[in-house]
């Protein structure tokens, strides 16, 4: 019993030390380079209290006009991100993209211009599942992963619906391929402009004990996002942070 108690305490202390390295962050924010309401510099100013932010403007989708996505202006987008980083050294600004991978409105990950995408710190893929409802199959993303040299994450994914009954298989794949999960706290309630929820609750609230257990067992990495398109929701991270802490999930190195 004593050894068992010591092991539990050791695991708790190790996890606490790991969690303490997680910086206050939000890696899912949109700027006026796509369909956000704030410029990148305005976002940096509004992000007071955060240590890391990630700007992940939309790319490679037919859901938005070309003027509201960045794939046609990547040089200007990157230059602005680097300029704002220089102006605001007090906060780390990650360069990101959110890519629509839906079979009808998005891009097959294997068809991406990898030389351009790999200029970024990370990319978030939305509309990924086992291939249901028009979503892109996670196995298509797996085929593309060796060509993606940046960090890769699943954007605001309703994992309990999308991977139901395949929790262990998917958790193992995510870890093996170093794909993290965006624990997305919705803008609903902050600005009333909608969000990524099911029956009024953020998707992570539906993660089952089986899914959470598999994520812990295989060490699936996570990061917090809010899919922010305006100011107030940039800081709307506390519920997601407590969820990560409560369930002993592992923060991605991007936000350590």
Image (cartoon, rainbow, N blue to C red):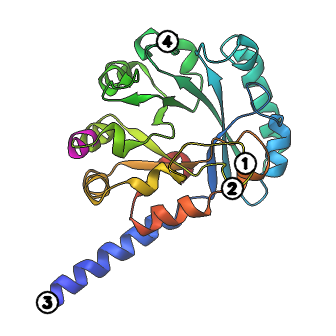
Q: Can the viewer see residue 251?
A: no
The disc label shown at residue 192, or none: 1
Provide the residue designation for mark 3. 1
Packing grade of label 4 (10 A; few <14, some 14-19, many >=20) is some
Residue at disc 2, secondary structure? loop
Mark 2 and mark 3 residues within 8 Å of each other at the beta carbon: no
Q: Earlier in the sequence, mark 4 or mark 2?
A: 4
Provide the residue designation for mark 4. 112
Q: Quadrant of residue 1?
A: bottom left
Q: Which residues are magenta?
A: 166-170
Residue at 55% from the left image edge and 24% from the top image edge: 99
Report, in whole angstroms, how far the alpha carbon at label 3 lies from the one at label 1. Answer: 51 Å
Provide the residue designation for mark 2. 189
Question: Which quadrant: the C terminus?
Answer: bottom right
Residue at 61% from the left image edge and 49% from the top image edge: 186
Report, in whole angstroms, how far the alpha carbon at label 4 lies from the one at label 3. Answer: 54 Å
């Amino acid at each position: 019993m004593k050894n068992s108690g010591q092991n539990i305490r050791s695991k708790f202390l190790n996890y606490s030390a790991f969690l303490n390295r997680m910086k206050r962050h939000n890696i899912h924010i949109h700027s006026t380079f796509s369909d956000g309401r704030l410029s990148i510099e305005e976002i940096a100013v509004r992000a007071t209290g955060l240590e890391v932010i990630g700007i992940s403007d939309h790319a490679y989708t037919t859901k938005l006009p070309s003027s509201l996505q960045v794939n046609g202006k990547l040089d200007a987008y990157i230059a602005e991100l680097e300029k704002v980083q220089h102006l605001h050294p007090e906060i780390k600004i990650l360069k990101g993209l959110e890519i629509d991978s839906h079979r009808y409105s998005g891009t097959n990950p294997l068809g991406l211009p990898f030389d351009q995408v790999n200029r970024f710190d990370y990319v978030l893929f939305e509309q990924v599942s086992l291939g249901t409802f028009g979503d892109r199959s996670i196995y298509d993303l797996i085929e593309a992963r060796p060509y993606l040299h940046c960090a890769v994450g699943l954007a605001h994914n309703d994992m309990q619906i999308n991977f139901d009954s395949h929790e262990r298989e998917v958790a193992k794949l995510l870890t093996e391929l170093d794909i993290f999960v965006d624990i997305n706290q919705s803008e609903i309630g902050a600005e009333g402009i909608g969000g990524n929820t099911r029956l009024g609750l953020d998707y992570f609230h539906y993660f089952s004990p089986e899914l959470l257990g598999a994520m812990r067992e295989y060490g699936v990495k996570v990061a917090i996002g809010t899919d922010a398109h305006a100011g107030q929701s940039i800081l709307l991270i506390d519920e997601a942070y407590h969820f990560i802490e409560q369930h002993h999930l592992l923060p991605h190195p991007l936000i350590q």
